[in-house]
Amino acid sequence: MELFDPSDIQLQSELAKSIANKLLEKTAKIGVIGLGYVGLPLALEFAKKGFMTWGIDISETKINMLSQGQNYIEDLDDEEVKHAIQSKKLIPRTNFSEVQNLDVIYICVPTPFTPTKDPDLSYILSAATDIARYLQKGQVIILKSTTFPGTTEQYLIPELEKSGFKAGKDFFVAFSPERVDPGNKQYNTHNTPIVVGGINQESSYLAALVNVQVIQKVYIVSNPRVAELEKLLENIFRSVNIALVNELALLCERMYDINVWEVLEAAGTKPFGYMKFLPGPGVGGHCIPIDPYYLSWLARSYDFETRFVTLAANVNESMPYYVVDKAIREIAKQGVKLSEAKILILGASFKKNVRDLRHSPSEYIIRILKKAGAVHIDYNDPHAPYYEVDNISMQSVPMSKEQLEQYHIVILVTDHDAYDYDFILQNIKCRLLDTRNGTKHVTQHREKIILLGYVQN
């Protein structure tokens, strides 16, 4: 692996030299397919740097919003998005025919899994099919969607080569995984280092040269498979360590009088050899719930079982069930039928202080409660006024005294800073199941708190 230095770039073909010159002169035309949490911030960075940038998405809602200068990604500055649109540096489109006029094309589409937890590459393949219709010689194609090793070479390239052009010769291909952390105020698209793995040296150099126009540090690895696997490693590392502290939390509940949150805070004082992870009601976002299964699926094709990785994913997936079980038992203590109980979920987003709802633990908790027989489920989230679970729309309820008084259990799933826990605990007539230790600084009404990972004798 090497840190890319544009002054060391080595290109042989005239096609590669031509696109490199366009990039250095800022005349290259950039395209980003998929304008979600990865694609729109990336497109905006290129537009801010003066590149003509086309954003392509099949969602007419997103394209209509952008065309009107409206931003829908919380981490982006509304005025920057509006200015990029009005200055025509960022051009939103649903039509893939724009591809024929581009020099660089990023693919930033979703990569979910099927109901049987096999990888779903349909979005990547669909984008590749549409690109192939308009592919031109000399274009650089960069896949950013998180996926398993081999996707770029075994799935993306064969689809692109249906254009009649040869990858690595007529056009250039690389994988460069996204690194997006919604709500992170320190690291963004511009200052987060990334890696690039091309199918040959020219593909790697050109993809690195593209990225370095908007990203401070770009590292080159030997091939796309290395880049694809390192992305899975990043997220599986988190999955495994979260599973570890989730199991520790459950153990502490069995042991009595050992507060897992105090244990973790104490361990965090060690300045070396330890990294702090926290337990919770489950894992959310796009990557952490999905990536372990991408790797385990691939491993099976090599007659290998990723037992450790799969076990960690199973532990994390069990946490919403554990939370629901605790809530149901608390309701039962009140002599109330689950079908008659009123339940409030605090926090719909998958992490605090953002409105990202992808694979949120709240979704699973609500679904499990309904399957168990719960009927009256409300939620509140200051960042997400509307929420949909299993095609049923919900609206965030107000945090008033009158509203809070009616519930039989309140479950804190996402510990937003906006929550006034003193006010909540003062006004509820039930108990609050705190799965995030959000109430750690509360001194009043602690008898109303059920804390995940701590049971007193």
Image (tube, rainbow, N blue to C red):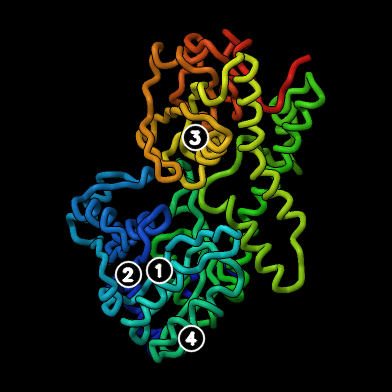
The residue at which mark 1 appears reads as: 106
| Mark 2 or mark 4: whose residue is earlier in sequence | 2
Identify the secondary structure beneath mark 3: loop
Answer yes or no: is residue 269 visible.
no
Query: Mark 2 belongs to which amino acid?
Result: Ile
Which is nearer the eye, 155 or 184? 155
| Mark 3 or mark 4: whose residue is earlier in sequence | 4
Which marked residue is nearer to the observer: mark 2 or mark 1?
Answer: 1
The answer to whether 288 is drawn above or below residue 216 in the figure is above
Identify the secondary structure beneath mark 4: loop
The residue at which mark 3 appears reads as: 352
Q: Residues under labels 2 and 1: Cα distance?
A: 8 Å
Q: Is residue 28 left or right of residue 366?
A: left
The answer to whether 184 is drawn above or below residue 19 in the figure is above
Q: Residues under labels 3 and 1: Cα distance?
A: 29 Å
How far across and how far down the image is residue 191, in percent?
46, 53
Query: Mark 1 belongs to which amino acid?
Result: Tyr
Mark 2 crowdedness (10 Å alpha carbons): few <14, some 14-19, many ≥20: many
Give the quadrant of the N terminus.
Answer: bottom right
Q: In the image, what residue occupies the spot 61% across and 14% down?
A: 335
Q: In the image, what residue occupies the spot 76% across and 54% down?
A: 308
The residue at which mark 2 appears reads as: 30
How far across and how far down the image is residue 396, in percent?
38, 29
The residue at which mark 4 appears reads as: 168
The answer to whether 124 is drawn above or below residue 410 in the figure is below
How far across and how far down the image is residue 97, in percent?
26, 76
| Mark 2 or mark 1: whose residue is earlier in sequence | 2
Query: Mark 4 belongs to which amino acid?
Result: Gly
Mark 1 crowdedness (10 Å alpha carbons): few <14, some 14-19, many ≥20: many
Identify the secondary structure beneath mark 1: strand
